[in-house]
Image (cartoon, helix red, strand yellow):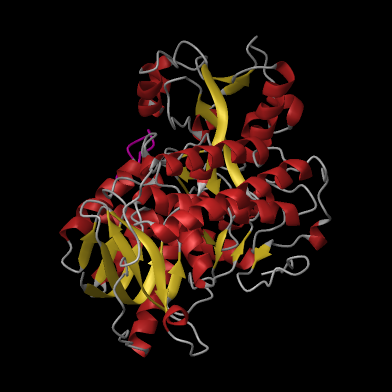
Amino acid sequence: MTETRYEVLIIGGGLAGMSLALRLAESGRDVGLVTKGPLTESSSNWAQGGIAAAIGPRDTTESHAADTLVAGAGLCKPEVVAQTVARGPACIQWLIDKGVEFTQAEGDGHAELHLTREGGHSERRVVHAADATGHAVMAVLEAKISAHPHIHMLLDQIVVDLITTAKLTDTGHNRCLGAYALDRNTHRINTLSAHTVVLATGGASKVYLYTSNMDTATGDGIAMAWRAGCRVANLEFVQFHPTCLYHPHAKSVLISEAVRGEGGHLLLPDGTRFMPEHDARAELAPRDIVARAIDYEMKRGGFDSVYLDISHKPAEEVLRRFPNIARNCLAFGVDITQEPIPVVPAAHYTCGGIITDLHGRTDIPGLFAIGECACTGLHGANRLASNSLLECVVFAAAAHEQILAELEQTPLQPPPLPAWDESRVTDPDEQIVVSHNWHELRRFMWDYVGIVRTNKRLERALHRVELLQGEIAEYYGNFKVTNDLIELRNLVLIAELTIRSAQMRHESRGLHYNLDYPDAFPDANATDTVLNPDWNGIGAMPVIDI
């Protein structure tokens, strides 16, 4: 096992990681890009709706900011929102300059981007490539990254943990020096050192039984940052996408927000619309309101699903706007031009994460976090639709500027790092232990820490988590690590942090709804839920406004 050095090590190959890697490489910097699988295996690649940016003739960044603040339910950081929406149009242009072909508006020959509208937006401002925006963007970036001489691809590798000075010496200060990564093909653990490490690992929705995310969304970056000493915030705010295809054989088939944005109606099994009774914005209400409304109607009526109907629109229009959704649904026997789509909510987006500043810097020097794994203050208590890909490209640009400045100021050479020690562990004896714990964790998180919570449910979930943590820690300490064990270890930590965050919030706000605290505090009292690894466990964990 040899040590490999890079100027910048980026962990994660979604839009945030790829955008940053390409920007750094084009600035002449040496980049190592670690991904669990192929570059196309990320939540970004599956994003359907698009990227929000105020580029329409009637739109303004102030309007975009206002919509973001409303959706965030009092917890967005205004300065972060302002920076993000202001830099949005330039980042869209950057993608266009790279070769991304967004859908054009039909008109009198003028080249204009087609803009769609999604829930929570007051204007049409979502730039898209039909209904497969993520794939269109990622395909272009993948081609450029794969051919760039300054980017070194480390595919099929999962990072086990970060390497920091605090873990190696007792000097009183801490800096990130690199990471250990398991090669999923050779089963060897590689030592990767770098001047700067960037976590771009995505979210943690796989902690729930039902999710729109890929199997890789296991919260690895958040868990590693916590173990390294970083604070995390607002992990109780898990966004459940209101509409995923309900079918016994369908897995993670998302029905885009844009279907409702283009006039789709949510119906009960008898064909009755119900959203107008829950919110004046009806189907265009923010996702948390729509998800809770669906959850309420399903429980009240004992339904397995509700229905999303776009069939009243002309079939040609539906197929032109949603070709991939139509094809995916038809594979399961649902013709969206002729019949409504059975849908249920599913865990979709992690609004909380590793605390960062406006440049993506974390609590630990040399460690950045961008994309879904970070808590920048943009989303607050609820993410506005299509602000996620926007955050990826904007904070990749911001981190790029900061990392370049730090590389020029302090061309730090990390010391030689110790190799991974497997001398005292053996091969796993029963992999069934891992699979059983995995299923148990995701089931009780769905049952007890889902769309609607109670104090008793949270207590039960925390008790189950603590039992699982003991089993997993013993397994981790005695056997060689595997991909599944690494992900399970991270997920059980994510579960604990999510539950503790939910227990600390004695109100209902945004995506967090607790029947024991159904009302929100006045906005003046709104505060972030911050967990600190240095907390000594005595007394109540403090709530700190970041």
Quarter of the picture holding the N terminus:
bottom left
Please state the horizontal and vertical placement of residue 317, each as a whole percent of the image. Answer: 41, 21
Instruction: Check residue 38 for magenta coloring.
Output: no
Extent of the magenta region: 100-109
Please state the horizontal and vertical placement of residue 171, each as a whole percent of the image. Answer: 48, 90
Is residue 424 among the parts visible in the rendering? Answer: yes
Q: Main secondary structure of the magenta part?
A: loop
Q: Between residue 146 and residue 82, name the one nearer to us.
A: 146
Query: How many tags in the picture?
Result: 0
- Relative to 287, is 181 on the left or the right? left
Task: Give me the residue at 65% from left, 40% from top.
Answer: 288
Task: Give me the residue at 41% from left, 59% from top.
Answer: 478
From what the image shows, is residue 148 above or below residue 121? below
Is residue 111 among the parts visible in the rendering? Answer: no
Q: Between residue 306 and residue 192, name the one nearer to us.
A: 192
Dividing the picture into quarters, in which one does residue 526 lie? Answer: bottom right
Please state the horizontal and vertical placement of residue 124, each as a whole percent of the image. Answer: 53, 41
Dividing the picture into quarters, in which one does residue 149 lie? Answer: bottom left
From what the image shows, is residue 188 above or below residue 324? below
From what the image shows, is residue 322 above or below residue 397? above
Task: Give me the residue at 35% from left, 18% from top.
Answer: 331
- Relative to 183, is 540 on the left or the right? right
Please state the horizontal and vertical placement of residue 356, each as a whole percent of the image. Answer: 54, 69
